[in-house]
Each structure stands twice: as C-alpha cells, then as structure tokens.
Image (spheres, rainbow, N blue to C red):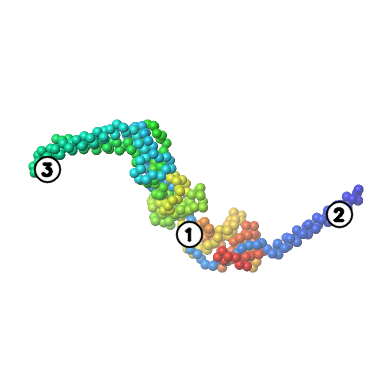
Amino acid sequence: MRNLIIFLLFFFLLACNDIVEENSQQTDNVNNVGVVVKIRTIDILSEFEEQVLSNGKISAIEKSNLQFKMSERILRINVSNGQKVNKGNIVAVIENDLLKNNVDKAEIELKKAQNKFREEKINYGSSNLTKELVERLKIKSNLLEANNNLEKYQIEYEQTILKAPFSGVIANLEKRQGDFITSSDVFCTIINPNTLEVSFSVLENEFGFISKGQKIEIQSFTDKDKQFKGVITEINPIVDKNGLIKIKAKVTSKNTGLLDGINVKVFINKPLEGVIVIPKEALVLRTNRVVVFTYENGLAKWNYVELAGENSTSYAIKKGLKISDTLIVSGNLNLSHDAKVNATFVVDDTVKK
C-alpha cells in the first residue's frame, strides 16, 4: 500500500512539472510577440472645438393658459391631453342657452329696427335726407340701440366658447363635462411644440467665448442617440451668487419630440487652436493621472499629459506630447512602461501592418 502511494505521488509531481513548463513556454511566447496594440501618428497641430457641458430645461416660447371669462357649468369638451389643435378650433363650451336666446332676440329686434328705419327714410324722401336727419331717424327707429344690444349679447355669447388662440397641443386638462368652472380657473394649457427654448447656465470663467447667435447642441437624457440644434438668443448680464450666468437658446430643430419642462444636456462648442488632438481611446488613467502611451521601437512608452479640453470624441493636449509621436490607441488599458508590443498601424479608419 505504501509503495502504491509513493508511485501515485511520483506521477502527480511529474504531471505538475509538465504543466508549469507549458505555461512558462506560453508566457515566453507572449513576451516575445508582445501585447497586440493599434497605433497612429500625430501629424499636425489641429483646430479643435471643446464641448462645454451644461444641464438645461426645455420650455415652450408660445404657451398659454386658456380660461373662460365667465363662471358657468361646462357643457361640452372637444379636446383631450396631447391632442393637436389648429388656431380657432373650439376647445370647450359652457352653458349658454340664455345668452343664445338673447342673441336670437337681439337679431329679431335689429331686423325690426332696420325695417322701421327704411320706412322713415321713404316717408321723408331721399332728397330731403340730411346727415343730421339720418342720425335722428336711427334713434327714432331704435336702430342704434338694437345694434348695440346685438353686439353686447354676441360678445357675451362668444365668451362661452373657448377657442385655440394658436395651433398647438393641449396639456394640463383636468376638467370634465358638467364641472362648474369660474373665470379664475385655468381650463387647460396650449403649447406650440415648434417654438421651444432651453434655459441653462455657464460658469463665469466659460463666459468669454459665449455670444448671442452662437450654435449649441441639445441632447435628451431619455434618448442619448438623438441631438438637436439650437442658437443662443439671450444672455443675462449678471453673475449670480453661485458664479453662474443664465442663458437662453432657441431650439432650431423641428419635430424634436422634446416636452415642455423636460431636462436636457446642452453642449456649447469652444474653439481651441494650435493644440494636439488625440482620440479618447488613447488616454488611460494611471495613479489618478492621465497617461498616453506612445510607441517607440517596439516598446510602449508612458507619457503624462495635460489636457486643454475635450469633446464627445477627442481630447486636446496642452502638454506631454509632440508632433510626430506615435500614439497607441488600442490595447493600452493594461500596458506598462517599456512593455513589448505588437503594433498595427491605423490611418483614416483603415488598418495597415
């Protein structure tokens, strides 16, 4: 039994030795070949647009709360939340039977007065009608009073009909048919979704490159794949207690789907000239500092860099790199200084050995 155990132990140690030798051989192969990376050269100093990021809120420029001018029970509602309406469409009607009767009666009285006025003019003869006489006949036939009464009742009747003042979308409708509504109550809100603006703030040290008419980009938090255009329309010339300057910009893109009150990201382009521009994938963090690896004679070289700015795809480098450096842009996450690399050269999105 003892001899069997010794025999098995001998074969176990022999197998372990084979595994160690195999792993060692694989490691040597990796060291000989090097880490696979992609590289590209820095050709020239580039013009660069840094994107300053701010949070903003969308609001409709054309927006109105709709209210009746008198208190009464709601007779009919023709719209719902989110419904599109055109200018002049009837939104809702309150009880108006009495006022409608007043209009009908006033129209009848006006016709009577018009007929009486015509009879009076005929009686006097057209050749004898002076301007002063015509005015007296209008009073005598009650024509002026009938006209005034009809206008008065028509205005009152029109106030029972709520119409859209412009084309837009209905919002904040909470009333129901049969509800009693007063002249101080808001029936609903109408918003023109094609007249949007975004309000945001920038730090005072970012104010120097911002001006009216400057273009911006807007991105929704809910759909990061879509970006919309805007242009700065208003800059408040006061720095608040937090060191911020308030800015407004008109959304110039159409059919954005952005809602009034929604929070968005705002990107403002800041031009920088004479900087070295590198793709974002070329930069890595080492000991809480930003590092770019360059390629020299088959080895990776570690370079601390100082950033001048960034946008969605690139970094602008102020210090730490020079023209003609060869950047390692892929396979650099776990590199160390002087690590052996197997490089593939990248130019204009194509790959060359």
**x then y, percent, for residue 94:** 35, 34
Is residue 155 visible in the rendered structure shown here?
A: yes
Determine the secondary structure under disc 3: helix
Instruction: Answer with left or right where residue 108 lies relative to residue 330.
Output: left
**x then y, percent, for residue 18:** 80, 58
**x then y, percent, for residue 272:** 47, 61
Between the C-alphas of marks 2 and 1, the distance is 69 Å
Between the C-alphas of marks 2 and 3, the distance is 136 Å
In percent of the image, x 70 and y 62: which residue is there?
30
Count of marks overlaid on the render: 3
- Mark 1, residues whose alpha carbon is within 10 Å: few (<14), some, or many (≥20)? some
Indicate which disc residue 10 carries.
Answer: 2
Q: Quadrant of the C terminus?
A: bottom right
Instruction: State the image quarter where residue 183 is shown.
Output: top left
Residue position for label 3: 131
Instruction: State the image quarter where residue 143 is shown.
Output: top left
Residue position for label 1: 49
**x then y, percent, for residue 136:** 12, 38
Between the C-alphas of marks 3 and 1, the distance is 76 Å
In percent of the image, x 42 and y 52: which residue is there?
254
Indicate which disc residue 139 carries.
Answer: none
Is residue 243 visible in the rendered structure shown here?
A: no
- Mark 3, residues whose alpha carbon is within 10 Å: few (<14), some, or many (≥20)? few
Residue type, numbered disc 1: Glu
Residue type, numbered disc 3: Lys
Q: Nearer the viewer, residue 202 or 185?
A: 185
Vertical side of 246 occupied by 330: above or below: below
Instruction: Answer with left or right where residue 320 lies relative to residue 169.
Output: right
